Amino acid sequence: MQEQKIYGSREGAVGHVVFNNPAKLNAVSLDMWDAFVGLLRDYEKDPEVRCVVVSGAGGKAFVSGADISKFESERANAEAQVRYDAISKEGYEGLYNFPKPTIAKITGYCIGGGMNLAACCDMRFCNEGARFGVPAAKLGLGYGFLRIERLSRIVGLPRAMEFLFTAKQYSSKEAYEMGLVNAVAADGELDALVARTTDAISQNAPLTIALAKAAAREIAKPESQQDHKKLEKMAEACFNSDDFKEGRRAFMEKRKPAFKGR
């Protein structure tokens, strides 16, 4: 039986998506993008899933980008590139607009498309051996507006230009110093670091978190396109929720609240 190149699993309230192509440093092909989108849709519909962690198998790479060996069959000309971009964009946008918190758990190389995937997540954590880079200029690829915008929102435009102009790789320490990752864990301790974060998220009020994420996505839009009314309705839903009542009771009773997301 052929091994799945991407798979999902659930641990309590945490959904996991694993890119499982370690022989190619978890390079991504079109069929993997299709599977990725399907997993995200499943987790979005599952009320038990409070957050999603995206990672790469094998320990040597998060995602190293597109599967270059597939370029002749999937990206050989402009027409094929349009098709590839449409399918991969669905994956990137599905992750960026996913309504629940997302975390990139990065080990080893996070290169090209892997950088874009990580930038679509809300938080990024890596191990000490992680390496980051955008080698588009070494391959002659066009790096589109959204990718540059999202990277620049995280690290600043001058640093994003440095990534793109030089195509150099950066260490985990450099990534942390520029704000690309939230934290760096010693090798072997990354799982525990991510688990502490997902545990905290899972114990907190889902409606409050959903509002915070929706607000973050609106902030990223031009002011003229921001939907403040949607955020106001989400805020009202928080105050009218059973979770708000539970939070007040738990505070008065000096116990941990048990939020249900309603």
Image: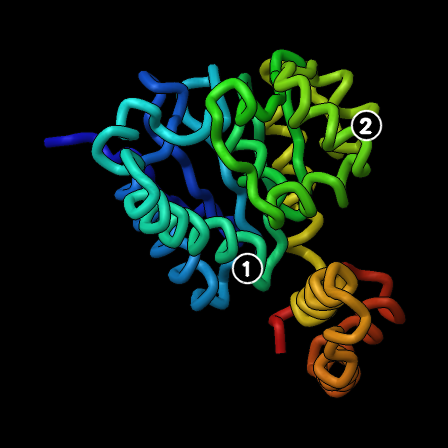
Answer with the quarter of the image where residue 72 lies: top left
Sequence-first tag of 2 and 1:
1
Label 2: few (<14), some (14–19) or many (≥20) C-alpha neighbours in 10 Å: some
Of residues 169 and 179, the one drawn nearer to the viewer in this rendering? 169
Answer with the quarter of the image where residue 205 lies: bottom right
Asked whether the viewer can see residue 129, the reply is yes
| Mark 1 secondary-structure assignment | loop
Residue wearing tag 1: 98
Of residues 218 and 249, the one drawn nearer to the viewer in this rendering? 218
| Mark 2 secondary-structure assignment | loop
The residue at the point 79 percent across, 37 percent down is 157
Answer with the quarter of the image where residue 127 lies: top right
Residue wearing tag 2: 178
Q: In the image, is residue 66 above or below residue 199?
A: above
Residue 239, position as x, y percentages in the image: 79, 83
Of residues 236 and 64, the one drawn nearer to the viewer in this rendering? 64
Measure the alpha-carbon separation of dots 2 and 1.
25 Å
Residue 65, position as x, y percentages in the image: 45, 29
Q: In the image, is residue 191 above or below residue 170?
A: below
For the C terminus, the quadrant is bottom right
The residue at the point 56 percent across, 44 percent down is 144
Dot 1 amino acid type: Phe
Residue 204, position as x, y percentages in the image: 71, 59
Dot 2 amino acid type: Met
Asked whether the viewer can see residue 235, the reply is no
